Image (cartoon, coloured by chain):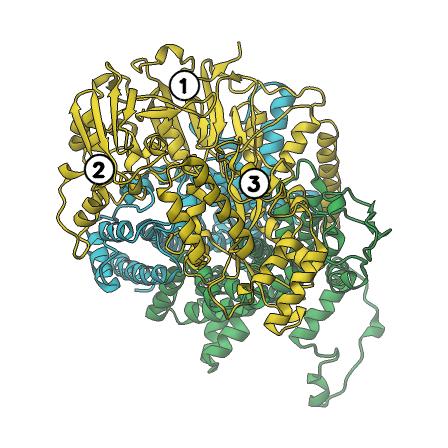
Chain colours: A green, B yellow, C cyan
Amino acid sequence: MEHIEKSRFAHVGESAHDREAIARPSLTFAQDAIRRLVKNRVALVCVLLIILLSAMSAFAPLFSPFDYREQHYSHTNAKMFTVCNEEGTPGFGHMHIFGTDTLGRDLYTRLWMGGRVSLIIAVTTAIIDLILGCIYGGISGYFGGTLDIIMMRLLEIINGIPYLIIVILLMMVLEPGMLTIIIAYSVVGWIPMARLVRGQVVALKQQEYVAAAEAMGASPARVIAKHLLPNTLSVVIVRVTLAIPNAIFSEAYLSYIGLGIPLPRCSWGSLAQLGIQNFRMYPWQLLIPAVCISLTMLAFNMFGDGLRDAFDPKLRR
Amino acid sequence: MKNRFVAWLLCLVMLLSVSVVAAAEVNPNAGLGYYPGTSTPGSIAIECSTMSVMNTVKMTYSTELSAARHMQDCLVKLSPVDNQIVGAAAESWESSADGLTWTFKLRPGMKWVNNNGEVVGDVTAHDFVFAWSELLNPANAAEYYAFAAVFKNAQAYYDYASGVDGAPEVTLDQVGFKAVDDLTLVCELENVLPYFLQYVKFEVMSPIYAPFYNEVGADNYATSPETMLYCGPFYMTDWVLENKITMKKNPAWWDAANVTLDQIEWIKYTDTNAKMNAFQGGEVDLIDITGEQRAMLEAEGFAPSSYIGGYSFYLYTNVEDTARDISNTNLRKAISFALDREQLINTVFKNDSEPSPTFALGISGVNTETFSEAVIAANNGERLYPVNSDEAKAKEYFAKALEELGKTADQIDITFMVSEGTQNELYNQVMQEQLRKVLGIEAKLEVLTITEARARRNAHNYDLFAGGWGPDYNDPMTDLDLWTTTNGNNHTGYSSAAYDELIEKAKVETDMVARELLFVECEKLIAEDMPIIPIYWRHEDYVVSEKMAEGYARLPFQALNMIYTKLAD
Amino acid sequence: MARYIIKRLIYAILTLFVLITLVFFMMRMLPGDPFLGEKAISATALANMNAKYGLDKPVFIQYLMYMGNCLTGDLGMSITYNRPVTEIVTESFMVSADLGIRALIFATIAGILLGAIAAIKRGTIVDSLSMFVAMIGVSVPSFILGAVFQYFLGLQLRKMLGMNIFPIQGWGTFKHTLLPAFALGLGSLATVSRLMRTSMLDVLSSDYIKTARSKGLSQGQIMWRHALRNAVMPVVTIMGPTVASVLTGTFVIESIFNIPGLGKYFVTSIKDLDYTMIGGTVVFYGALLIICTLVVDLLYGFIDPRVKLEE
């Protein structure tokens, strides 16, 4: 039996007010979550990594002596750290840190230009996935019955339409660009999330705390938002972190069929796709974008784990 | 704790994979350079592309025609040695003095075999008559029916049978091909056609055995090895759609004694890395390769081969829609002079493709070896299109263009329409960058699926579109009649009375030298009006394993001819 | 239960009907026509081809005819391949399904095991290792994974050992299925194991596991009877559509390993604008998808005692 110091206990007196008072400061859900997130050092490192990748993407191209589309015909497929020997160009004498691609374009500059595209698309689409998926899945699962059946059949229909058809039709209406890609991915991207949330909600709504909330007169919106969704968070966060690489790859696929970022701009996905063509001869052309994708992926995943621990009400101590 | 471990582990694996890849590249079996090919004796495996239709009447793709070349015999064919016409099903032939009637004598004793190599019947002149009638049968909707439309009354019959309004009645027996007896075929032509034999050698003109065809039905015919018959050097034993076709030697073929191959497998690849792996791993004997792969093999000391299929590549320009900047002739000339064709080839294709000196390629000249040489000779020995960028001329024409358009350089609005595909995208990106460098034009790229790109090309809804053309027969007409006003393949909207007149004259001119001069004028007119901007003549690289010693051919009009391949011991 | 199934089946047919209708009209909005080749064809030939495939009639009439044919199980003749769509789809589906089942078995068993073990051994090396394996599959796209496997395990291994362990490409023998199934399975494995781990963690911290523990049940019994069954739930949820898409093949893996599967037709039919083939693949995939979700929903009832199937 642990010895407890007597001085830690003091008589509060007979006042009812004092007796019911909460001695420690009360924390809201969000405050508590943030407090726990900050304590998680690995998650912080990941946030830093994400910030670093984003900062490089934002600023590195500005300070590079090369333009992302400038082609150096005298040294195509150059090795890493090759010095540019083309006189009369602004980059003369500067180093191609990551070499050049098959058209002689500076890969370092292109990598960070691509980072802009990939990171923005990844994050935006993940957020859209999350919002649409949670709302749709939550409503469908909570209300159940015919509404649920119809909403779920609707998902099947959207899922059943070939993606390529949707994309080509979108392409006819919209200008190629970042927004189009985000829309094209979001049209179908949220479906697995909705299905997942709905599955979780169907199971959770039989729980006592839901019955209790309903008994106390909570509106369906409140039950879904305050009681059901927070309890699905752990699974949802995993799904979101998986959706991020999906979005990056799907952008690569879209650029392959023409709805990608307009050429000669690039993304990590399209750099990897170009790299794979020659990976036996110039492996770094594939490895560098692939490592960036993996690092982003890793950082988001580990950050996601941290978030999960921070937000999961069941792990709240 | 756990996360940090994962991070370290991942870094380690990344490092490892870098070093593994690096190691593999530093020593890619240096000095080995030896690719023995597939292991089955007497058999070769070669790469092919689309193989969706095996009914010769309905074929369209070049590899389908190549497959047909190995399974059926036309009246005549091209020799794999020198690409000249030699007899195939026909032993001899003669034409009347006016060139309108041709009589073919068929080789006696030719047999039809089925997919087990069993003899089913004799090849007769009636089989050709039947096949050509099927080509003209509207129910088959044959895309290449025009090859049978050269016969007397054939086009009239086709129109009548298709129910074209106001077409007079013409019956099949009025069409100009007749089987006089089992071994004699008489053809009457609508017009004089100096290159008629080039038509007859085309694989869609192969014979078909009527009793069998009618038995399986037109829709079912040639949809599997069992539902077709063969009269050529090989017969098909297996067909996995869009994947693989297996052919075995036909011992009943008339020249079987000279065929040493027992089997050919045609494999369709869609991934360039995959086929190189398969080649190096001994799963295929012949593949087409990219410039980078060529460099890789050369670094190993293994020499790839290269051939000219006759394809000339150029930019279609929209000259018709005057609302577009590109309809300005001086702007098109400025673009032509601004492009550095040599740099383009070295950067994108990294092979022996040539910057186009003239448009038509792969055509023989009358007194010169190639038609192109005749054009250059007539142009004071100068090529029509430059090898390297000619900045001075480009800027000169550009200044004129800007003045005519009343715009400044940054207001010029040009879009390259690009059909998807890595190499095609790279190709267009280089042109885009060259225009930016030399002329300061910010051209856009618009990538589309091939079907959508073609639809927009045909509807003349584009500025610039990279395309290519391969000849169907050995005569400048196959290339040059493209740019007449009424030609269905003239997607530029180019309409020049002078040009049309030259082509009409050439159609009736019988003096070959005078005729060639007309074609030379056509080439010059193209360079002057520039409805297309010729870019390069394609050389295609491929590798063969050391198993295939000799006897095979890759030439214009016969992209693949493996019939007489001799294997290494 | 029977009533529920019947009700769902009726919905399934309705869903399929709406899906086919939507796709039918959407594909007609795609630019171009199926007969666009590199070389132009004459107007007469084009008219003849349109007549042959019934494309000369008004679109709505074509729709009615197509639906009528669908009811009799006739999906029409492929425009590109000149043969019945049903024949092409069934032949290539056999190949894709064969490969898909192998990949799924591998992904599900390995994924659930990896995820469960990682959760049970949370915070140890085992946990990290399992999750690392899972991450490879999801952080490397399949076009890289397939190419790298083919190069290292197919070509380099063969050169090193001088024997043929993994064929580089092709289809036909058991050996041919190994590399593609592995490459295909890794993608799903990542999702399965990551989800499995999290949901297992949730379950392990729940009260009924504590209760079971305090009852004195053995670790094995707790895992098998209480934890696994409940934790597998979210995994099952996402497996429905995954099964449908894996069974019908993937374009990338099929083209890298040269497998005569169904996956490529989903892409090529749209690029070639082969209307009948697009319709055929959509009907087939749609039906499979609907069946899979139905099965998943039914499975819920068996796996998770908390879920009641709504009548």
Q: Pointers 1 and 3 in contact (CB under 8 A)? A: no
Q: Check the residue under mark 3 and report the chain it is in.
A: B
Residue under pointer 1 = B263
From the viewer's perspective, tell me whether residue A247 is left or right of residue B144.
Answer: right
**Residue B374 at x, y percent in the picture:** 54, 38
Residue under pointer 3 = B537
Residue sitting nearer the eye, A170 or A19 = A170
**Residue C174 at x, y percent in the picture:** 45, 27
Of labels 1 and 2, earlier in sequence is 2
Q: Secondary structure at mark 2?
A: helix
Q: Quadrant of residue A265?
A: bottom right
Question: Label 2 amino acid?
Answer: Glu
Of labels 1 and 3, earlier in sequence is 1
Q: Residue at x 20, y 20 (%)?
A: B183
Label 3 neighbourhood size at 10 Å, few (<14), some (14-19), many (20+)?
many
Instruction: Tell which tag, 1 or 3, sits nearer the viewer.
Output: 3
Residue under pointer 2 = B134
Residue sitting nearer the eye, C183 or B163 = B163
From the viewer's perspective, tell me whether residue B221 is left or right of residue C246.
Answer: left
Label 2 neighbourhood size at 10 Å, few (<14), some (14-19), many (20+)?
many
